[in-house]
Image: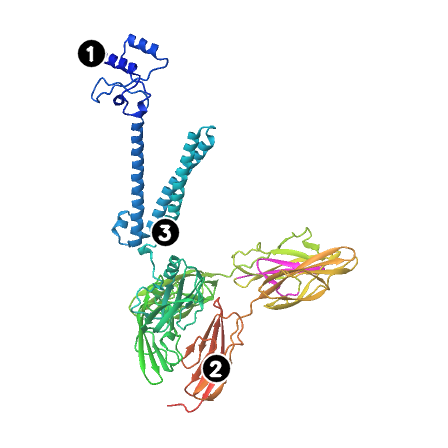
Amino acid sequence: MPEENQNNFQNSSSDSHSEGSVPDEQKPVNPELENVSVNRPRDEADAKSSSEKLPQTPVPIPIPLKKSDPNAPKKIGKEPVKKNKNLRFLLGCSGFLLLLFVLFISLMVLVMSRGGGDNAVIAAFGLAPGAIRGFLLTVINLSFGFLSLLLFALMVIGFFRMAGAKKGDSAARMAGIKMAFFSLIPFVIVLFIWFFLFNFINRLEVTAERVVAKIVVVSPTNLSDLQAPVEMTFNAVNIKKALRQSRLSVASALWDLDGNGEFETPMPADGEVTRLYERRGTYEIGLQVQVVGEAKARVYTLPFVIQNAVFAAEPSTGTAPLAVQFDASGLLPGGLKLQSMDWDFDGDGVYDLTGPDNKWPRFTFEKIGTYNVHLRLIDSSNNVENYYREIPITESDVPLLDAKIDAVPGLKGVVPFSVRFDAGKSTSLKGTVTGYEWDFGDGSGLQTGKSVTHVYNTSGLFNVTLVITEDSGKTDKEIVAVEVQSISSPPKAQIKTVPAIGSSDELSGVLPLKVVFDASKSTDKDNDIIDFEWDFNGDDAVDQQGAKVEHVFDAAGTFLVTLTVRDSTAQVSQSMLMVKVIEPGVLAVINADPEEGSVPLLVTFDGSKSSASNGKVVSYEWDFGDGSPKSITGATLTHKYSTVGVYSVVLKVLTNMSENAEVTKQIFVREIPLSACFESSRHDGAAPLSVTFDPKCSTGSIAKFSWDFGDGVKSSSHKPAHTFEQPGTYTITLEVSDSKNNVSVYTDVIVAAGDVLQ
């Protein structure tokens, strides 16, 4: 430091001490620096003088220096001013970020409340309108959740600082209280804002999400040109969505699909229903929705018009030959009286079916092609309506021209072998078979005809060739082999049993004795055994047939079992076996009447033939094999079987000597046989004669009725009525069939009296 300055510093110091006070203009600018010592040079004399004069450390007086003075003394201690600036900067940034977040939330709410599905702001975020709400709720939950957690943590820290302050340290306690208080207030505010925004946005609807409550036609998509019969599918999904958006719940919903004002079809879970409309006309379907909490049900309607109609065909296309079921009931308004319904199925201009009762005809298209089926309706006023529908018949895997050979009695026999060959099953799907030519393969020459007979007088293997010719000139052939044998050798019958036959060529066992008889070891050099017949009691009657059979001997005694085998040339061979059945100590015997029959079957069981060699039978326990409880009664009883099946009935007998035995018998319960039958309301009368036919006397599981009234009119009704317009004798035929295609036919005669028109 320069000497002049040092002297000045010393003089100033000396003067200040002598005066005992500090001039006002020399007090520190910052009051916080009043107690801070300033480094300044002083000589040893001054230091010594000061220490002698003052008992305590003197308060140094800083000399004001300009900021640009490089010799300004450095400050000792912290710099709180700079720290406050950093804190204000952080608070400013936080407030700015919070402001941006609030603006973002406000913008998104504005977009949701006023934007639609085509809003450019929504599209800029790459979100579907329906997804904005979920996205915004997620952002709010994450942001306010984090902020709430942070404020809660600060509040807890403040409470801990307040509680942990030392006794008497009011400043630390007050700092904790302030921290907890100033965290609690924003914590409550944040929770309130969070709750408000969540509920507000959750209730906000996006324009694109709003759904109009109406019935939707799923199919067909084009309603401008509907044609009956048409199957239509409706859906109530938009009604359900609209009610959900309005925070409403559906208690029940019923459809009115025929437009008669009666709501009778419950709405399924998916809201979709389907109905077949068979007639043209104007319809107004409806859906009645009962909303929870509302006294009056809401009704939604949908009108539509079916302008055109055509008769139905099932199937409407297929491969030849194709049987098609037609249905013209949809063309007939209620109450319309028809004079005639005339059908031309093959489009040749000739009506194949005429008459008033032809609503549901059936026709088989044998040939390939597209057929323009024509229906002519004539009402009672002679008004005529014509309907047309094309039925395409396409090719199938079946050959267009196919030769088939049937041989009776077969393709194998002995000399002389007479065979009748028939080509009746040969088919032509496009044309007509006009020629049949046969080559029998034995050099006898060619024969022609649909059915021919030929005799083979020599043995050997012969190839029979059939060539058929179509009217177009195309041909097809089939070849079959005929085996003609010389006089064959006889078979040799042989019996094997389980249990095995004893060494004395006799089989013995205790009553009841069950034996498996096996004739498969029987031989024939020609290997042509065709029949096995068994007689188990020596009465020369056939009891069972087959190479392997089972038989139970239910009576004691000795029985002669005879096996008869027969080959294809009617040569036979027999083998016999003696079976000895020994009576046991206790014998259980069941007799059943009947043992088989149609459901419901009432069977009488008799166990009185049961016996005991030592003592007597005192108890009969019956198990009928149908799941019904066991019965411990007398020797005879009756049981009813109500379902079809094979039932194993077990009888267990007990003697007074505590000995027991049991026996099993099978009962066969069959379905009611299929049998066609009908009753006519009358059998004769003057023409026109109206008759009602009732098939109530028919039996069995009938799946289909086919009526032929003998005047060219057919029907598939269950109980038809028919009018015989012209005099004559008519044979009525009813054909019934079940689900397994079993068929039964019944006929009756109706006589319509009157003069026959010439």
Q: How would you rate the neighbour count of disc 3 (Cα within 10 Å): few for under 14, some for 14-19, many for 20 or more?
A: few
Give the distance between the C-alpha atoms of the residues marked 3 and 1, in whole angstroms.
79 Å
Which kind of residue does numbered mark 3 sit on?
A: Phe
In the rendered image, residue 63, in percent from the top left (x then y), is placed at 25, 19
In the rendered structure, the answer to whether residue 495 lies left or right of residue 418 reads right
Alpha carbon of mark 1 to alpha carbon of mark 2: how far? 151 Å
From this view, report whether residue 232 is shown above or below residue 378: above
**Mark 3 element type:** helix
Image quadrant where one finds the N terminus: top left
- The span shown in magenta is 539-567
Label 1 secondary element: helix
Q: Is residue 545 above or below residue 65?
A: below
Magenta stretch encompasses residue 172: no
Q: Bin the neighbour count of mark 1 within 10 Å (Cα to Cα): few under 14, some 14-19, many 20 and up.
A: few
Residue pointed to by mark 1: 4
Q: Nearer the viewer, mark 3 or mark 1?
A: 1
Please identify the quarter of the rendering in which residue 266 is found. bottom left
Q: Is residue 182 left or right of residue 699?
A: left
Labels 2 & 3 near each other (Cβ < 8 A): no
User: Which secondary structure is most common in the magenta stretch?
Assistant: strand
Residue that carries the numbered disc 3 in the rendered image: 200
Tell me where residue 196 appears, x and y as whole percent. Answer: 38, 49
Q: Which residue is mark 2?
A: 692
Badge nearest the viewer, 2 or 3: 3
Q: Quick one: which residue is furthest to the front in this view?
A: 19
Residue type indicated by callout 2: Thr
Q: Is residue 532 left or right of residue 108?
A: right
- Residue at point 43% right, 76% down? 715
Instruction: Check disc 2 and report its element: helix, strand or loop.
Output: strand
**383 over 51 or under it: above or below:** below
